[in-house]
Image (cartoon, rainbow, N blue to C red):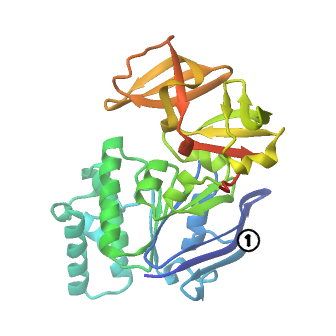
């Protein structure tokens, strides 16, 4: 196991800056997620840590050693790729044993390690098969096994589940979480899937356009998003945003928008923003159907079994709300929502207005 420290890392391809002076740390044994949309630089960061690409600036430390000048083999990291990257002419056994062969490990020790990891992953019966004889989930287990068998200091996962169907992705998330609890190996895991990030990660580093927007636990990013970028990427369905202004009314404060007028006087952090335009974010689960502050017309209902998701129009804004499965209203009908205060967030020019009460 090892501690990873990235400091002021920079990378460009031609005139395009992909990574812009980012810094973060992964503690010994921690499971860290690099989360963000396609093209945000997260896979590039992984390749820089692995030594597959060369940085333009900054430093990468594994424990107390600066590794930027070391070859990939000298860094003692193992990477699992989205494409599995298995050797098609080798059996499962030989694919898993390959890194140990390169280390010139004795045959008996190598055999014991391969069979131990195969048992851990439940693929003992596949050892003599070729990759073409495996399902997607089985190939992914083999790729993970090839990484585990080395017992590296750090695991690097580059969107390893993206080629699997939804049911298998969910099952593999459980297996990966279980493996991490058993192995306690420092892990950096790249994904654009926030469900993977929220369920697997002990720490999330959320990126956009090569810049870190926020670092913290899944709960931190959900409950206290640093800006509208983070707020929009964390939570399923995503946060609703209403543009409006903080105004004075009857001695108190209100938030007024095209969609609603809501008293916000108890929120002391909003007092300096009187007369200014702000963005109010509302979690879909914070919209409580009944009599309330927002009136809307239902445009679509997404039935999900135990619950439903409403898409509704309030003024010029579209809002999304989670409701019970037996909610009972359909397309074209009117609905009113009360707001749960804990699901409300306010932003000024994109940045979170911190709560001070």
State how many labels appear.
1
- The part of the image, by quadrant, that contains residue 178 is bottom left
Q: In the rendered view, would you say 73 is above or below 244?
A: below
**Relative side of 21 to 309, left or right:** right
Q: In the rendered view, would you say 21 is above or below 102?
A: above
Q: Residue lying furthest left in this view?
A: 125
- Mark 1 sits on what residue? 56
Picture coordinates of residue 206 (x, y %)?
59, 57
Picture coordinates of residue 130 (x, y %)?
26, 58
**Relative side of 167 to 123, left or right:** right
Picture coordinates of residue 285 (x, y %)?
48, 37
Q: Quadrant of the C terminus?
A: bottom right
**Relative side of 254 to 197, left or right:** right
Q: Quadrant of the N terminus?
A: bottom left
Can residue 351 be seen at all in this image of the molecule? Answer: no
Q: Answer few, some or many: residues within 10 Å of disc 1's Cα (few below 14, many 20 plus, some between 14 and 19).
A: some
- The part of the image, by quadrant, that contains residue 184 is bottom left
Q: In the rendered view, would you say 131 is above or below 283?
A: below
């Amino acid at each position: 196991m090892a501690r990873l420290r990235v400091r002021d890392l920079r990378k460009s391809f031609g005139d395009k800056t992909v990574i812009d002076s980012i810094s973060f740390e992964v503690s010994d044994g921690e499971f860290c997620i690099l989360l963000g949309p396609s093209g945000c630089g997260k896979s590039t960061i992984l390749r820089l840590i692995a030594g597959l690409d060369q940085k333009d600036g900054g430093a990468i430390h594994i424990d107390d050693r600066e590794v930027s000048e070391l070859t990939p083999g000298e860094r003692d990291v193992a990477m699992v790729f989205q494409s599995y990257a298995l050797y098609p002419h080798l059996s499962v056994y030989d694919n898993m044993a390959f890194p140990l062969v390169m280390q010139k490990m004795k045959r008996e020790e190598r055999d014991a390690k391969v069979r131990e990891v195969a048992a851990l992953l439940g693929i003992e019966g596949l050892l003599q098969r070729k990759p073409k004889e495996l399902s997607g989930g089985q190939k992914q287990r083999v790729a993970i096994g090839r990484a585990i068998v080395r017992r590296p200091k750090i695991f690097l996962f580059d969107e390893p589940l993206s080629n699997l169907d939804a049911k298998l992705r969910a099952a593999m998330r459980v297996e990966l979480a279980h493996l991490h609890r058993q192995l306690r190996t420092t892990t950096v895991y790249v994904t654009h899937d926030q469900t993977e990030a929220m369920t697997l990660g002990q720490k999330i580093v959320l990126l956009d356009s090569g810049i870190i927007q926020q670092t913290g636990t899944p709960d931190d990013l959900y409950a206290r998003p640093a800006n509208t970028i983070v707020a929009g990427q964390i939570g399923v369905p995503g946060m609703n945003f209403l543009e409006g202004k903080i105004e004075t009314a009857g001695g108190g404060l209100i938030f007024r928008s095209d969609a609603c007028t809501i008293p916000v006087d108890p929120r002391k952090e909003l007092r300096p923003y009187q007369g200014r335009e702000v963005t109010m974010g509302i979690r879909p689960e914070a919209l409580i159907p009944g009599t309330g502050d927002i009136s809307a017309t239902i445009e679509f209902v997404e039935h999900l079994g135990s619950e439903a998701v409403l898409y509704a129009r309030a003024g010029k804004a579209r809002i999304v709300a989670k409701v019970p499965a037996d909610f009972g209203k359909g397309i074209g009908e009117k609905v009113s929502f009360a707001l749960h205060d804990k699901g409300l967030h306010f932003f000024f020019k994109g940045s979170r207005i911190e709560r001070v009460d």
